[in-house]
Image (cartoon, helix red, strand yellow):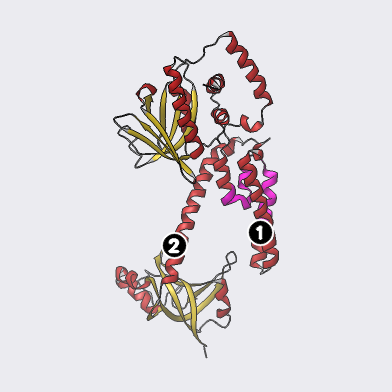
Amino acid sequence: MDNLNRYRICTEKADWRGICDINGVGFDSLGTDKEFEALPSYLEPDEVVFAVASGIMKQTITSNYFDAGPNTWLVVLTSERFLFLDAALLTSSIDSQSVRLDKVQAISASQGLLLGKIAIDLGSRLITVDNCNKDAVKVMADLANKWLKDLENGAKVPKDSPEMKEFKKKMSKTDEMASSVSELPSVNRTAAAIIATLLGGFGVHDYIWGAWWLGVPKALLTSITFFLDSSESFVLSAFLSLIVAVWVFVDLVRIFNGKYFVDKKPSTVANGLRGFLLLICLIGVAYSGYTLFSEIGDSLKKDNGKLASIREIVESYNQNEAAAEKSFDGTMFSIGGVVRSVEKNPFWGDYTVKFEGLGSLNFFNLIGKVTEIELKFSEKRGSELTKARKGDVIVSTCIGRGLFLGVYTAEKCKLKTIRQKK
């Protein structure tokens, strides 16, 4: 096999990025950082790693109790076997499986538009790893088939012969001249790209990879755009937002080609925060998806034609909270009452209307289950409230959000009528 000596040296150094470089594929440890750290302890003496890939594989009877359903596994092709590693989510234990190459009957790889899949046929069963880097699975399948043929012809892993020692010296000199990108095995381009995409406007990826002097101006520009937007200087705000967006896009290009990491090393604190921040980013994506579906659901809601007074809402929750939730939570209806105050949120710009008879005085809420009722109006709807004064009676169409910690909230409100106080 070509590059056998190079594979062996990279294995001895635990240089998994170097092995990917030999194979001409990108190194990606997203979801398998713990597996890569543990890999050296699972290798046998003189065992050489030829290729690595990560993907989704179903759990087996050897899986950890806390793991459920498919999980991300690290697949390793070595000179002896296929090795599979999966780190537990909540513990430090690692699941491991291995298949000796003499048991393998066929290896196949399929490539989709973005991801790939590798299948290892053992005759009695088929091991399939899906959602892998499509280039990595093709290389792994090709190398496996080629090495199996070499083994049939009596190929062996080279020992420490004088020629091998001389080759190591040459490789050592080459490594010293190599790009610093290959000297940063902790760099995770996918993680950096995700963080830059979601939080790049605040320069979070710059802080993590030790370039705070680039992160600070990004954060300042983003903060200024929020201030300008709240001041209705939309043109200047959009211009600064475009500058930040282009800057982050350039960072993404440099992240994928590796140039971004030159002369950058993650700080000790950043190494610990990287996984946490990535989790926060994923939570943010999930929350954004939930918000999107909620917005679509709200847009489909129609006014049920009911008009409820503030007193009616309070008494309904005090008498039967379950029945009140059915009537006033998640539905669109009209709410009427006497205004106590109209308040503007200084951060988000939306407006809140509160009503007399509640709050600190609680005139007609002796039981006290509902301590406040708040109607939320968007910033665009704020102009509708300019004529509302304390003591005026207003009627608004809103979507009820239910009672939480004594506060009943209704959102997406639209003002219908105002009756001025005489």
Q: Residue furthest bottom?
A: 422
Residue at disc 2, secondary structure: helix
* Residue at image point 38% right, 26% down: 98
* Residue denoted by label 1: 241
In this rendering, is residue 332 above or below 68? below
* Residue at image point 53% right, 29% down: 16
Is residue 165 visible in the rendered image? The answer is yes
Q: Is residue 149 left or right of residue 205?
A: left
* Residue 188, position as x, y percentages in the image: 56, 38
Around disc 2, counting alpha carbons within 10 Å, would you say few (fewer than 14), some (14 to 19), or many (20 or more)? few
Q: Overall secondary structure of the magenta stretch?
A: helix
In this rendering, is residue 277 above or below 118? below
Q: Which residues are magenta?
A: 196-225
Around disc 1, counting alpha carbons within 10 Å, would you say few (fewer than 14), some (14 to 19), or many (20 or more)? many
Asked whether 111 or 219 is in front, the reply is 111
Asked whether 105 or 335 is in front, the reply is 105
Is residue 409 visible in the rendered image? The answer is no
In this rendering, is residue 15 above or below 330? above
Amino acid at circle 2: Phe
Asked whether 33 or 109 is in front, the reply is 109
Asked whether 258 or 321 is in front, the reply is 258
Q: Which mark is residue 293?
A: 2
